[in-house]
């Protein structure tokens, strides 16, 4: 299943205004892996994600999805393979009914009406929001919107799921339900996030991006037990580990500012 | 601030009205759009000084509202809300058009006043008709009907997006105004601040439009928006269209109040 490999090589990207967002990024994500992209605000995570489905094209370097190098000719195939879940579900749910939104992708793939319908229903069932199919998106709660947004991507049956801050803005229970849901997916997952506790639950591998470069790449457990590395990436250990005397290893995290 | 916020809920209310079920709700959207357009044309095409001839048309919205199970007060309230715009348009008629048209006892009524009343009547009729259409059909369905009837996709898609994002945009605007009010201690928004607020909202809108476009591209958008909907134009819809349109034609070309008056005079 080489289709599900994501390979980024010496990726460099400069915005038109001259800002260098990515200096040199290389990694290879294998089929079925679940990888977290972490890093400070402005480290280049979102810019990197936008390269993975061809919205931005690299100034230098290459992105390969499976056997296909990403370029203008292959962009359609790549977008079929890579499903993007945006941070703000309102950006993703643009139709007037949840059903139409989930059907949007499959219809663009040119599938028959029955096929579209069965895919939509299956996707809605997977994320457990079938009862919301006739509701307008603006009437949904944050958690429901996120599920609907994920369904709108699942209905295209992508092999790779790319998510930007999936747990941002969700209440603890919706967050937990989302984590459990994602846990059940067999897709290759790439998740950009600040929610390091979620990373511990979902991702075996973590890549730290800092200043447009890869600062660390390895098993999540190793990365998170290296306080020096985390500090360099403007990160902290997940809260869960901080209270643990063994994992925290007596490292002094920056004290919160006192009034 | 409160007004803008309640405005959001109000649009939502129109949507909830469309979710109900009644004979009118069950009609095909195209049938309702057609008759509404016909109604508007008939009303607007009457003579500038026509008042009596417009009165029968009032029956139409009344029947539709009662059949759909809506409350009259809601529509009256909406009419009052938008009436300042029309008053502004019509208010100059009595000033410019001073030709005496008729005498009501000792009072001479000028053509300007007659056309003023006529404009108000026409406005009330057409706006109510449009509101009833949307309240009994739902905005997205109206757009779809327009598209099926041959209105270019560019327009219907624009309308749909407008409707989808008006809530998001208004909420963003409300948040900005709220944060302004919390730090302005009762001072109204000054022009110098207002232009920043408006500019900011515009920039955010452009950003959001970009992100939405991105989300669409990610799911294979190629310039055409496809939906899966099969609504049938049935016999009852045809009957509704024919019956309503012929009734409206009679209202328009036969002066019913005058006819009624003559009949009344002949009988007694």
Image (cartoon, coloured by chain):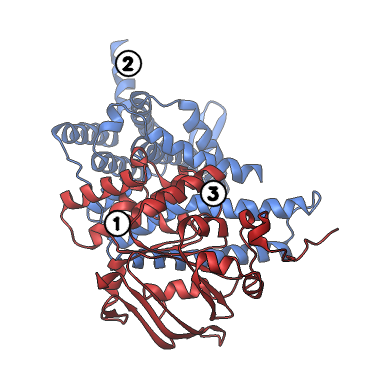
Chain colours: A red, B blue
Q: Distance between the residues labelled 2 and 1?
A: 62 Å
Q: Closer to the camera: disc 3 or disc 1?
A: 3
Query: Label 1: few (<14), some or many (≥20) within 10 Å?
Result: many
Q: Position of residue B222 (x, y in %)?
A: 28, 68
Residue that appears at 47% across and 32% down: B75
Which residue is the extreme one toward the top?
A: B268
Q: Closer to the camera: disc 2 or disc 1?
A: 1
Are discs 2 and 3 located on one and the same chain?
A: no
Residue that appears at 47% across and 36% down: B13
Direction from residue B184 to residue A15 in the image, left or right: left
Q: Where is residue B5 in the image (x, y as percent from the top left)?
A: 60, 44
Residue that appears at 58% across and 40% down: B6
Query: Label 2: few (<14), some or many (≥20) within 10 Å?
Result: few
Residue B264 has which mark?
2
Give me the chain letter of mark 1: A
Q: Identify residue for label 3.
A: A170
Are discs 2 and 1 located on one and the same chain?
A: no
Q: Tell me the quadrant of the picture where the N terminus of chain A can be found.
A: bottom left
Q: Distance between the residues labelled 3 and 1?
A: 25 Å
Q: Tell me the quadrant of the picture where the C terminus of chain A can be found.
A: bottom right
Residue A104 has which mark?
1
Q: Distance between the residues labelled 2 and 3?
A: 71 Å
Q: Is B100 rendered above or below residue B180? A: above
Dot 3: what SS?
loop
For the residue pair A224 and A104, the one nearer the viewer reads as: A224
């Amino acid at each position: 299943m080489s289709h599900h490999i994501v390979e980024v090589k010496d990726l460099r990207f400069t915005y038109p205004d001259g800002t260098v967002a990515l200096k040199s990024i290389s990694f290879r994500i294998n089929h079925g892996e679940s990888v977290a992209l972490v890093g400070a605000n402005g480290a280049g995570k979102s810019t990197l994600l936008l390269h993975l489905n061809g919205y931005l094209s690299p100034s230098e370097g290459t992105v390969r999805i499976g056997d296909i190098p990403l370029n203008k000719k292959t962009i359609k195939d790549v977008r079929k393979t890579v499903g993007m879940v945006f941070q703000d579900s309102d950006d993703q749910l643009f139709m007037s009914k949840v059903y139409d939104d989930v059907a949007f992708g499959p219809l663009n793939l040119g599938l028959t009406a029955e096929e579209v319908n069965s895919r939509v229903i299956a996707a809605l069932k997977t994320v457990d929001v079938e009862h919301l199919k006739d509701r307008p998106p603006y009437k949904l709660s944050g958690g429901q919107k996120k599920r609907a947004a994920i369904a709108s991507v699942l209905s295209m049956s992508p092999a790779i799921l790319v998510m930007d801050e999936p747990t941002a803005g969700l209440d603890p229970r919706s967050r937990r339900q989302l984590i459990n849901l994602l846990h059940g997916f067999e897709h290759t997952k790439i998740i950009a996030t600040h929610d390091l506790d979620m990373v511990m639950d979902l991702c075996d591998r973590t890549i730290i991006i800092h200043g447009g470069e890869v600062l660390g790449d390895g098993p999540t457990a190793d990365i998170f037990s290296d306080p020096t590395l985390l500090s360099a990436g403007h990160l902290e250990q997940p809260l869960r580990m901080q209270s643990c005397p063994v994992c925290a290893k007596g490292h002094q995290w920056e004290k919160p500012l006192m009034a | 601030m409160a007004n803008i916020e309640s405005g959001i809920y109000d649009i939502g209310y129109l949507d909830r009205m469309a979710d109900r079920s009644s004979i009118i709700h069950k009609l095909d959207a195209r049938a309702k759009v057609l008759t509404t357009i016909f109604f508007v044309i008939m009303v607007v095409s009457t003579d500038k000084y026509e008042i009596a001839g417009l009165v029968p048309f009032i029956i139409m919205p009344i029947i539709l509202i009662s059949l759909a199970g809506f409350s009259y007060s809601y529509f009256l309230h909406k009419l009052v809300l938008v009436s300042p715009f029309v008053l502004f348009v019509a208010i100059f008629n009595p000033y410019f058009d001073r030709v005496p048209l008729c005498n009501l006892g000792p009072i001479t009524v000028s053509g300007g006043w007659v056309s003023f009343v006529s404009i108000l009547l026409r406005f009330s009729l057409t706006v109510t008709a449009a509101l009833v259409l949307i309240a009994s059909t739902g905005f997205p369905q109206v757009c779809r009907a327009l598209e099926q009837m041959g209105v270019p996709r560019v327009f219907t898609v624009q309308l749909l997006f407008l409707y989808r994002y008006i809530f998001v945009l208004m909420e963003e605007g409300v948040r900005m105004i709220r944060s302004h009010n919390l730090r302005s201690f009762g001072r109204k928004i000054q022009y110098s601040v207002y232009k920043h607020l408006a500019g900011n909202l515009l920039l955010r809108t452009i950003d959001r439009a970009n992100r939405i476009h991105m989300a669409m591209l990610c799911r294979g958008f190629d310039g055409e928006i496809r939906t899966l909907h099969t609504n049938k134009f049935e016999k009852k819809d045809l009957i509704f269209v024919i019956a309503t349109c012929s009734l409206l034609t009679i209202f328009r070309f036969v002066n019913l109040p005058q006819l009624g008056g003559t009949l009344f005079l002949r009988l007694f």
